[in-house]
Image (tube, rainbow, N blue to C red):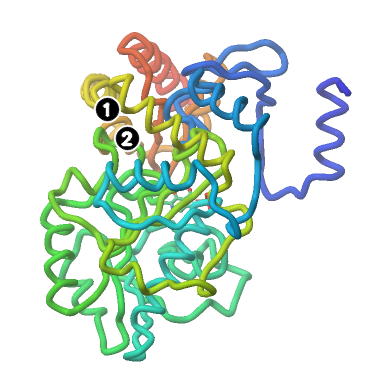
Amino acid sequence: MTHDKTTLLDMQSSHVLGTYSPSLMLVKGEGAYVWDIDGNRYLDFAAGISVCNLGHCHPRVTAAIREQAGKLVHVSNLYYNENQPQLATLIAENSFGGRVFFANSGAEANEGLIKFARKWGSAEGRYEIVCMADSFHGRTLATLAATGRSKYRQGFAPDVEGFAFAEFNNLDSVRAKIGPKTVAVLCEPVQGEGGIIPATPEFLAGLRQLCDEQKLLLLFDEVQCGMGRTGTMFAYQNYGIEPDGMSLAKALGNGFPMGAFELQAKYADVLVPGTHASTFGGTPLACAAGIAVFEAFAEEHILENVRTVGAHLQQALAGLCAKYPAVKAVRGAGLMLGLVVEADLKPVLAAAKAKGLLALTAGENVLRLLPPLVITIDQADQAVTILDQSLAEGLVQA
Ligand SMILES: Cc1ncc(COP(=O)(O)O)c(C=O)c1O
């Protein structure tokens, strides 16, 4: 059944809840490019918001999904499947050798981490989690309550209780929030939605020490900054410390929806049969996609590319800071980069889109770039040229 664009847009406005404000209708993707229904091509520096890290329709992932879809799609976790243990092993080998639970999204992965922390602290009546201002952990009720931007919670009261907020990158602020009911500290090693803000090395090392001293769990949300985005497989690996647990999602299936959380092996007995579950978590199909993703990382020099092209892009973006007074800073790590712009970003992003570049915003005034990790130096340069022209046009209009 095919419909023209006007009919599709009518169907959308009549029957899809209007919780988003989409613009282009995208119909095809390959590598760093996507095409809209009118045949226009775009360099995609959003990558599905850090999801298609290997680029669109990566041949290895597409082949794995196709093959598995013809073999076995779903069986439930009442049965073993061949792929789940293999993917769990790949996650463990690429991180801290822990135990993995499979879910379907970032919010669900974080819900699992929160439940784990509460279960672990339940014998002592500890359940409160210290989270960070400007953090983002998802849209379910508990993950909203853990999210450090109150605007997302408006209209959804009462909040799930048990969350306190400290200032990100301020150890004293975290210390001040710890009380007798505190069980864990949760943060993103690089804040994404909050505005591409990397944790300082002192902060994460300090959190690790503080959690050890106070018998608290240190939990990292790697949903956006994980899976190679910052130049190591997981962002925490840039900091020389390990968490007690971390959540993953987004790029784990390169677009095939999946999430997961991993706990250090010493916590393997906290969540026993009957305590946590998910119908679709870790299906043969989802795990086939995840296995193909890790194979691509191992064989296609992806992390090397992130480091090389990321450094090049960061330097080129610094040139825009020097050129435009409204562009105050470039920050981030690897290919998770943000330009701090003191102006309305809407006209800048609209100009970029008209010139064939898709980009994002974050926080109040950050132009966020999350390209596929397979982009070339040439594609990075093309993006910077378009951004340069778009800033020249957009800042004038602003
Ligand atoms: C750091 C972080 N955690 C959690 C989430 C929620 O993930 P999902 O939308 O898959 O539920 C996001 C989504 O943007 C995120 O950036």
Residue 357 in sight in this render: no
Cβ(mark 2) to ligand 1 < 8 Å? no
Q: Residue at x 60, y 60 (%)?
A: 78
- SS label for mark 2: loop
Q: Position of residue 215 (x, y in %)?
A: 20, 78
Residue 22, horizontal then vertical, whole percent: 66, 36
| Residue at mark 1: C-beta within 8 A of ligand 1 | no
Q: Residue at x 53, y 46 (%)?
A: 258
Label 1: state its secondary structure: helix
Quarter assignment of residue 334: top left
Q: Position of residue 322 (x, y in %)?
A: 22, 24
Mark 2 is on which residue type? Gly
Question: In terms of depth relative to the viewer, which is nearer, 280 or 49?
Answer: 280
Please rate how many residues cluster around mark 1, counting C-alpha atoms within 10 Å: few if below 14, some from 14 to 19, many from 20.
Answer: many
- According to the picture, the residue beneath numbered tag 1 turns out to be 303
Three-letter amino acid code at the position of disc 1 = Leu
Q: Quadrant of the N terminus?
A: top right
Quarter of image, res 35 = top right
Mark 2 touches mark 1? (CB < 8 Å): yes
Task: Say how many tags the image has.
Answer: 2
Residue 203 versus residue 82: which sits nearer the camera? 82
First in sequence, mark 2 or 1: give its number.
2
The image shows residue 217 at horizontal and vertical percentages of: 27, 71
- Residue underneath mark 2: 228
Which one is nearer the viewer's eye here, 238 or 119? 119
Residue shown at the point (38%, 25%) measured from the top left:
296
Q: Is residue 119 left or right of residue 239?
A: right
Residue 383 location, quadrant: top left
* Residue at x 32% of width, y 35% of height: 228
Q: Is residue 303 left or right of residue 387?
A: left
Q: CA distance from mark 2 to mark 1?
A: 6 Å
Q: Nearer the viewer, residue 383 or 264?
A: 264
